[in-house]
Image: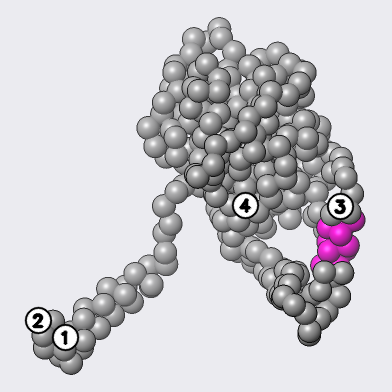
Amino acid sequence: MENVTDSKSKGEKGTILVTNDDGIQAPGLKALVSVLVSTHRFNVLVCAPQLEMSAVSHSITWRQPLRVEKVEMDGATAFKTSGTPADCASLGVSSVLFPSVPDLVISGINQGSNCGYHTVYSGTTAGAREAFLNGVPAISISYDCYGGLSLEEFEKMLRVEAGSKTKMNYEYEAAAKACLPIISGIIAEIKNNTYPQGCFLNMDLPKDIANHKGYKVTKQGKSTMKIRWKQITSNGQPSEIDHHLLFRRQLSGFQVDIDESDHKSLQEGYISITPLGILTHPDKDCKAYFEDWLPNLIQQHQSHNPLLD
């Protein structure tokens, strides 16, 4: 992607835009903003959803205008919007909401990891991807606060949080501080015009962040949650007779990576740093298969339909 950020003199502060998918009041975002502001090295901007937007992927608002409202956040210029994470990132780098394009966009800190296939569903990752699509360097950051939980424990934790009006705090301040060397290093590279423009970064932080084993560049794996559907009624119980049908997603297990990957490194206690792009790269075997399959298919079809020749 073409970089649209202006080169800055070495004496000026870097400008960072923060967004997320957990919402403007999420502790992960608040901790990140607080830590960035406390360094006195960055101008901090915030544009984030007013409500939780987890797992909305890269959806955008098209037919309706966004409602935007300024909010108080110590040391930062902050706005909440009615939009998605991708909306917030797009608006934040547009020079319409803020007077200039930020040097760097950070999406996070997300509550829960975003490794492997999870990046497809993640609104956090989409916030960084949208900035990258607009030519602005970006990082998505997620904290594996549920790490080590069994399937039953994980589901129980989700139910507890769903019934709570506030997010669990976990160790977000420590997680934000662990990101500072990477953030500062990226800002320095951007100012020197030496930062690569062909990717954005996805960072995942281990649960025991105070004792992490270091920083590790990783590749995206194929880890994901396995989902099943269960029919329910309005009171949450199974139903066979109802005026309408209700179905709820349920976790049925986890698919994890055996080979080296972002998820495996995270589970080993490393802070994984994974370069991501926009284009997909299917398996070579699939491409070869369809290169052989398509001409044969067309030939067979034409032999049975002479009028198509």
Q: Marks 2 and 1, Cα distance to the nearest angstrom?
A: 6 Å
Colouring? one colour
Q: Say which label, 2 or 1, has the lower sequence index.
A: 1
Q: Are marks 4 and 1 in contact (CB under 8 Å)?
A: no
Q: Residues within 10 Å of mark 2 (few under 14, many from 20)?
A: few
Q: Amino acid at mark 3?
A: Glu
Badge number at residue 56 = 4
| Residue 261 at x, y percent in the picture | 60, 57
Assign the magenta stretch its main secondary structure.
helix
Seen in the picture, residue 224 relative to 102 is either above or below; the reply is below
Q: Are marks 1 and 3 in contact (CB under 8 Å)?
A: no
Which residue is identified by label 1? 302
Q: Say which label, 4 or 2, has the lower sequence index.
A: 4
| Residue 77 at x, y percent in the picture | 67, 19
Q: Are marks 4 and 2 in contact (CB under 8 Å)?
A: no
**Residue interval drawn in magenta:** 149-161
Which residue is identified by label 3? 161
Secondary structure at numbered mark 4: loop
Residue 61 versus residue 24: which sits nearer the camera?
61
Q: Marks 4 and 1, Cα distance to the nearest angstrom?
A: 43 Å
Residue drawn at point x = 60 percent, y = 56 percent: 121
Q: Find residue 293 and report its image quarter.
A: bottom left
Residue drawn at point x = 68 percent, y = 70 percent: 226
Q: Marks 1 and 3, Cα distance to the nearest angstrom?
A: 59 Å
Visible in this render: residue 211? Answer: no
Which residue is identified by label 2? 309
